Structure formats: structure tokens, C-alpha cells
């Protein structure tokens, strides 16, 4: 039995030796390369041309005759410039183009109101100076 055990141990040693030899790498082993170092690039603030005026205005078309009694259903059918003219005719003194857009949103929610009532339901700081 000793001869058989010696043969098994010898065979196992031979297999391990051959396995290790097959897995060896030529050259010197190297660990995973480190990531490249992070470099910071200093930049200056970008330079932009600053406009001399902060708002642009364009002429408004005349407001329709029924601007103060117009229903919201009618208001949402108008183009943006005419909506701004209606907002102005109803007392808006801030950016009438923005107020016209806000009023349009209100009118979509409340189509049975008049544009005047919809404007008055907003906080005054949105539409008055």
C-alpha cells in the first residue's frame, strides 16, 4: 500500500508542477495599473457681452374692443401679442407678454371666467408694478 500511496502523491505532485508551469507568466508580474493622476486646469470666468438694456419691447397691436369683457375661451384663441394687449387693457403694468402667458394658463383652467376676472384672481405682484 505504501507503493500505491507514493504513486498517487507523486502523480499529484507532477500534475501540480505541470499546472503551475503552464500558468506562469514570462517577465515580472505587474499589479493593475493605477488610474492616471487627476489634473486640474485653472480657468478664468468666461467673458460675455452684457446687454445695455435688460428688457426688449415691441409694439403691441391694438386690444380688441371687448378686451375687458372677453371670455377666457376667446382669450386662449388669440396670438401672443394680442393676449399681451388684452392683459394691458385689463390693467397689467408689468411685463405684459409674461402676464399674457400667465393669463392664458389661467384661462385654460377657468374657461368660463372673463379674462378680466382671471387676471384679478392672480396675485397683484404678478401683474402690477
Image (cartoon, rainbow, N blue to C red):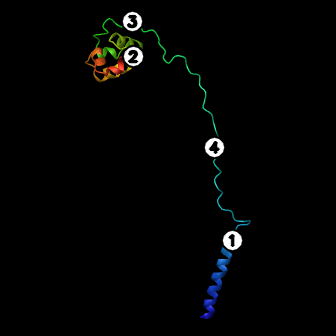
Disc nearer the start of the sequence (2/1): 1
Q: CA distance from mark 4 to mark 3?
A: 58 Å
Which percent across, then down, holds residue 102? 36, 21
Which percent across, then down, holds residue 5? 60, 90
Mark 3 element type: loop
Mark 2 element type: loop
Which residue is depicted at the point 34% across and 9% down? 89
Residue designated by label 4: 40
Residue 94 located left or right of residue 23: left
The disc placed on residue 62 is: 3
Whether the residues at callouts 2 and 3 have beta carbons within 8 Å, the answer is no
Which percent across, then down, holds residue 107? 31, 20
Q: Single out the mark in the foreground, 2 or 1.
A: 2
Q: Characterize the local packing of mark 2: few (<14), some (14-19) or many (20 or more) Cα atoms within 10 angstroms.
A: some
Q: Quadrant of the C terminus?
A: top left
Which residue is depicted at the point 29% across and 10% down? 68
- Residue 111 lies in what quarter of the image? top left
Q: Nearer the viewer, residue 16 or 70?
A: 70
Disc nearer the start of the sequence (4/2): 4
Disc nearer the start of the sequence (3/1): 1
Whether the residues at callouts 3 and 1 have beta carbons within 8 Å, the answer is no
Residue 84 located left or right of residue 52: left
Q: Single out the mark in the foreground, 2 or 3.
A: 2
Q: Is residue 104 visible?
A: no
Amino acid at each position: 500500500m505504501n507503493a500505491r500511496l507514493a504513486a498517487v502523491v507523486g502523480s499529484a505532485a507532477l500534475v501540480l508542477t505541470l499546472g503551475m508551469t503552464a500558468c506562469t507568466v514570462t517577465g515580472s508580474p505587474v499589479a493593475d495599473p493605477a488610474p492616471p493622476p487627476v489634473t486640474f486646469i485653472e480657468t478664468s470666468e468666461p467673458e460675455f457681452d452684457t446687454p445695455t438694456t435688460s428688457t426688449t419691447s415691441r409694439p403691441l397691436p391694438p386690444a380688441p374692443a371687448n378686451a375687458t369683457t372677453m371670455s377666457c375661451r376667446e382669450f386662449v384663441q388669440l396670438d401672443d401679442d394680442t393676449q399681451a394687449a388684452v392683459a394691458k387693457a385689463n390693467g397689467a403694468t408689468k411685463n405684459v407678454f409674461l402676464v399674457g402667458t400667465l393669463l392664458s394658463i389661467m384661462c385654460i383652467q377657468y374657461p368660463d371666467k372673463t379674462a378680466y376676472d382671471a387676471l384679478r384672481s392672480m396675485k397683484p405682484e404678478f401683474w402690477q408694478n
